[in-house]
Structure formats: structure tokens, C-alpha cells
Image (cartoon, rainbow, N blue to C red):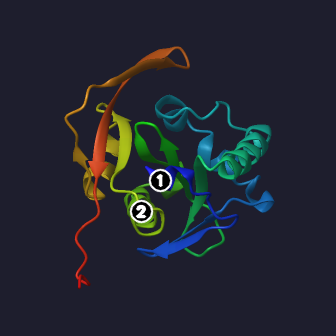
Amino acid sequence: MSSSTLPFPDRIELTGEGLVLRDWTEADLTAMPDLFDHPDIAYWTPMVSPFDEAAARARLDRDRQMRAEGTTILLAITVDGCVPLGEVMLRRAPEGTEIGYAVGPAYRGQGLAARAVRVMAAYAFEQLGVEQVILELEAENAASVAVATKAGFSLLDLPLIEGEEKGRPYALQTWGLRPTSSSCSG
């Protein structure tokens, strides 16, 4: 797909659904451990644990490297453009354009993940020309299954992605979303 060769912009800010998705900054380093140093995030995601300020620095540096390589963007989920409440990711991979997310424990239950996923999917469809975005998640992760459903994704009939991370086996389902037909067709 030709979209996999397009570079990402140096700066990204996406708005919609009452959210502002923005680049992580140096000022966010102290807030990131409160968002990501949690047993649920350690269990369900590949993020390091414990997630301290050193891990935050490494994540910010890796974010900038992956964006420069054109593979991944990580954006802070905010409602005001300032205070980060979580993160949404878009990753270009051979298996497809994947979206991922994590919301800080204090901010769950507000629909932030589903809204952020929809905004990021719209960016992928409208700006990158992607034909489908995917979520890869474990069926046992009820919160992520709920996000997938609320964001309009459907479970795809694909083999499970099996592996091991942090000493535990996992089996990921693949959920997909395609753009809705536009009401502005000519």
C-alpha cells in the first residue's frame, strides 16, 4: 500500500468527539507514570513495568524515532489540549494499520478510548488513505472488547496472533474498521 511510504508530519494535533489528540511533550514526562504505571496496563500492553520517569523518557524518545521512521505515531489523549489522560497509537505494519490505546486509571469510564480510536481512525482514512484499520486485542480483555465495539469495529475472521510477552502467553483477535461511505459523494 502506498500509504506505508508516506512520512508522518513532524507535528500532529487531531480534534473531534470532544477530544484533542496531540503530540507528547517534555512537559508530559512527569504525568506519564500516573497514566501508565498500573497493573492493567502492565498486563494487557507491551509497555514496560514499572513505568517511571525513566520509562517515560524512553517512550518519548522512541515515539520520536518511530515517527521519523514513518512507522508509528503516539498521541496524548486530552480534552483540553493540555492535560494528558491516556494515549492513542497508530502503527503501520505488514498486517495492516493498527490502532492501540491506553487510558490512565483515573480517567476510565468516560469513553475516552473509543472516542480517541474513532478520531485516529478518521485520520488514517482521510489523511493517510488507509482502507482499513485494525485493533489487536485479547478476548479476555473485556474493556478493550467494549472499546472495539463502541468504536464500530467488527471481529475479523482471521487466525489468532499468538505469542508471549512479559512471561505470559497471549492470543490476540483482530478487529477491523473500514471507512463509512461519505455523504459528500459526487
Task: Label 2, secondary structure: give it.
Answer: loop
Taking the spot 26% from the left edge, 26% from the top edge, the residue there is 159
Residue 103 showing in the rendered view: no
Residue closer to the observer: 81 or 75: 75
Residue closer to the observer: 151 or 94: 94
x and y, in percent, of residue 131 in the image: 33, 56
**Residue 165 bears which disc, if any?**
none
Taking the spot 73% from the left edge, 46% from the top edge, the residue there is 65
Taking the spot 64% from the left edge, 30% from the top edge, the residue there is 49
x and y, in percent, of residue 167 in the image: 53, 14
Reading the image, the residue beneath label 1 is: 2
Residue placed furthest toward the front = 2
Question: Measured along the vertical axis of the image, is residue 136 above or below residue 78?
Answer: above
Residue closer to the observer: 155 or 93: 93
Q: Disc 2, disc 1: CB below 8 Å?
A: yes
In the image: residue 7, left or right of residue 60:
left
Real-space Cα distance between discs 2 and 1?
9 Å
x and y, in percent, of residue 85 in the image: 57, 59
Q: Residues within 10 Å of mark 2 (few under 14, many from 20)?
A: some
Please name the amino acid that badge 2 sits on. Answer: Gly
**Residue 129 bears which disc, if any?**
2
Please name the amino acid that badge 1 sits on. Answer: Ser
Residue placed furthest toward the left = 157
Task: Label 1, secondary structure: give it.
Answer: helix
